[in-house]
Image: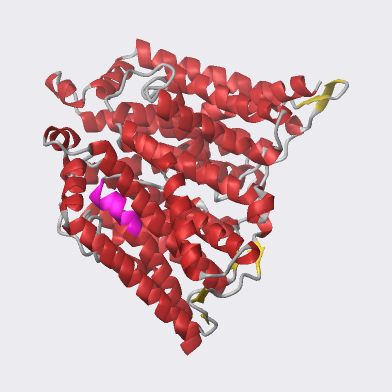
Amino acid sequence: MLIVQLIFNGLQTGALYALIAAGFSLIFGMTRIFHAAHGATFTIAGYAFFEMYSVAHLGWPIAALTAIAAAAIFGMMLDRWVYAIIQRHEGSFFTVFAASFGVAIVVQNLIAMAFGRGLVTISTPLSKSIELAPGLFVAPMLAIVLVCAVICFALLQYLLTRTNLGIALRALGENPTLIEVYGLTPRKISQFAFLIGSILVVPAAILTATTSGLNPSMSHHVMLISLAATIVGGVGSLRGAALAGMLLGMAENLCLAVIDPQWSEAVTFVILFLFILFRPGGVYGRAIAT
Amino acid sequence: MIAYLQNIAVLFCVNGILALTLNFIMGYAGIYSLAHTIFFGIGAYTAAYLALNVTDSLPISMLAAFSLSAVVSMALALPALRVRGEYFVAASLGLQVIGVTIFAEWKSVTGGLGGMIGIPRPKLFGYVFNDDTAFLILSVVVLLAVLGILSLLVRGSFGRSLMAIRDSESAAQAYGKHVNAVKTLSVAISSGLAAIAGVLYTFYMSFINVEGFTLETSILLMAMVIIGGTGTLLGPVAGAALLMTLPAALTYLPFLPPGELGAIQQIVYGAAMVLLMIFRPGGLVGGRSKEKSA
């Protein structure tokens, strides 16, 4: 029974990881910006939802819209006022990364000052576990998480393959100078990547708030998970990110059958480390020059 | 007051060594490691374990810490040889998380989350560094020694090979540089010297636990190097001094709520990182945008 329980837990963690990674994977894959502040977008969205839903009692649709607006504004401002300026005079990935990390640190501490450092959780009847079979506890939240993940990735897949914007985004990921020849502005498309990528983090943030709770220092963990899933899946491949998120979530839970729980987080990063050593292109990635 | 300043001075030496060694691989070899604290931790835990179980001799602890850390640093050198840029940063982040988990959970050696307490002061040729002033002198001497070693290395042919590899790996190879050997050696030296800082830290604090060796510390070190100036010799020391005196300076501002000082301090250095990257990517000491794109 333990194994079945772990598989169910793994499904939930995996779907959440896939959702978390989707936005980062889109931004990193298409614009090549090492968006370390993705975790900050996540906490901003989560706390915006918490404030509107649990403190102001405005109902979940308004709360979700606020979270979407907050994430989108933050992501686009960051792209326009930080990344664009750095890229204008200097292209080093590490400069962008350090600036992004600085933003993440500022946001984390501002949230800690405003909301406190403790864990905040949003309790709904949906996060209460039901005993499906003897010894097997599953919360209805699992179904919601899975449905959300499927919808998000289906929409994203449609956007990237069937719309002009999606094609432009993928072109930006392939060759940013060439698309200028076709009369497109890389900066404008990059703004769209940030808009979509930041909104994509909202479902993950809300679902995490209801399942395991939020705290301000989560942003590093979120960033690490998205980075791990993006690289393991292959940079630039959204289905790779989805698969890798699922794989990492599963691995983190299934390993509990053999080792102590405190080691489970390390399993994710051992997988990441091995992938970088032996298959840096990821599951679906293009071969990268070393 | 004197004791307080001495305390800051010793910790400044420790952080100065860490920033210097991190800059050695970050600024000169282009290896952007976010796992530097792991080697600091290896040095600290080695010294603590030896002092509690084997010997409190300073040279032996330093030698053991240096060697162990240099050997473990091969885990960082491997990805450095295979991948560049974002991929390496990701690998080093992974290593950092794995390392912290090991520090926190390998209870028989590291004492788990509780850490190790009651570490005695070290002995050097029969002299015990019980006096804080003597310890401060020791720290300054070690800091200067590390600075000396690194500046010799950087100015010599080894440093030129490193910078050549940083700027263009294939060109360096074409000129007959042993790229892999030079990179591996630089990581080993940097990590080994970082472990020496760990030894000092352990003996000074006489207490260590995993809190000191988390990702936050690695980021703080990165901030020191970046704010001071990557690829300059004195930049990281200046960055360390700035970020060490910042919390002390903030306590003197009466209008700040004392409970939030830690957060305000972090906000200040986070904001400093962002603004510097926008306006002065070379850091405070470095020239304007001399950094090469990776």
The answer to whether residue A242 is visible is yes
Residue A43 seen anywhere in this rendered image of the structure? no
Q: Nearer the viewer, residue A5 or B175?
A: B175
- Identity of the residue drawn at 44% across and 46% down: B71
Whole-percent x and y of residue A145? 63, 25
- Colour pattern of the rendering: secondary structure
Q: Residue furthest top?
A: A162
Give how far across and how far down residue B9 sits, in percent. Answer: 42, 77
Q: Is residue B292 left or right of residue B51?
A: left
> Which image quarter holds the C terminus of chain B?
top left
Residue B21 in which image quadrant:
bottom left
Q: Main secondary structure of the magenta part?
A: helix
* Of B190 and A224, the residue lying toward us: B190
Percent x, y for residue A74? 40, 43
> Vertically, is A39 above or below B128?
above
Compare residues A256 and A26 and report the one nearer the observer.
Answer: A256
**Coordinates of residue B82 in the picture (x, y in percent):** 33, 31
Which residues lie in the magenta part? B21-29
